[in-house]
Image: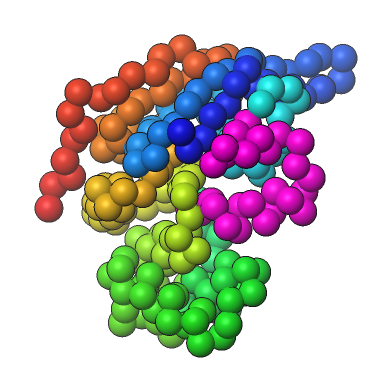
Amino acid sequence: MLLSLEAVSKHYKLGDTTIRALDSITIKVDRGEFIAIMGPSGSGKSTFLQVASTLAVPTKGSITLNDREISSYNEVERARLRNKYIGFVFQQFNLLPRTSALANVELPLIYAKVSVSERSKRAKAMLELVGLGDRLSNAPAQLSGGQQQRVAIARALVNDPDLIFADEPTGNLDTKSGDDIKKLLTKLNNQGRTIIMVTHEPDVAEIAKRLVLFRDGKIVSDRQQRKRKAVKK
């Protein structure tokens, strides 16, 4: 078992009202899974991603990652854990605008105190893996949306994380670029990467092996997909 959430809740106060963004959910994730998280706006899917990835702290419940109970970790401990075990891919790419693709991918390695030569070597290898070996010096403004998302994926991979969280990874892309990212995520999962992906697009969810549906802060469906959809070449 790679990740486990047991009776996890996340509540917010809005005046005198308590918002139950997550309401006592339990889910287990094995290594090598590719899970799509879906649900209507306000269903709790984004809050789940934030809590499961340690970007937010649960109100109650237990979270275990790599056999470590991490629910009570402080912010410094959570940041170290994210840098070592978790990679993130965001809808908005979150790249440094005046920095090259290579330097953007190197960023997690700086926080991990990896040597300069090793940082460059590993970042180049990741950019080559995502098909951008010829774009090392390009800044984000010199790249298409699909290429920027590939840089973001390379950055998520560079520390060899156990788990990748992808938040609407095709949401800002045109159809062709979105298809390219779907192919890349499928390829990474076939290589053994564990991916948890939030999406509102049914055709994107179809590439995952498992589909989890949220509504009103609860998991209302959790099933294996009979045969995940192949992305057209």
Residue at (49% x, 81% y) in the render:
118
Q: Residue furthest left?
A: 233
Q: Residue 147: percent from the left, percent from the top?
A: 36, 66
Residue at (67% x, 56% y) in the render:
80
Nearest to the observer: residue 201 or residue 31: 31
Q: Residue furthest right?
A: 16
Considering only vertical position in the picture, is 118 above or below 131? below
Q: Residue furthest front?
A: 67
Q: Residue 159: percent from the left, percent from the top?
A: 50, 63
Instruction: Please state if 184 lies on the left or on the right of 87 as rendered.
Output: left
Residue at (38% x, 70% y) in the render:
126
Residue at (27% x, 52% y) in the render:
191
Considering only vertical position in the picture, is 116 above or below 112? below
Q: Is residue 76 magenta?
A: yes
Considering only vertical position in the picture, is 39 above or below 208? above
Residue 160 placement: quadrant: bottom left
Magenta region: 63-89
Nearest to the observer: residue 215 or residue 222: 222
Residue 85 visible somewhere in the drawing: yes
Instruction: Please state if 139 lies on the left or on the right of 67 as rendered.
Output: left
Colouring of the image? rainbow
Instruction: Please state if 156 lies on the left or on the right of 127 as rendered.
Output: right
Q: Is residue 199 magenta?
A: no
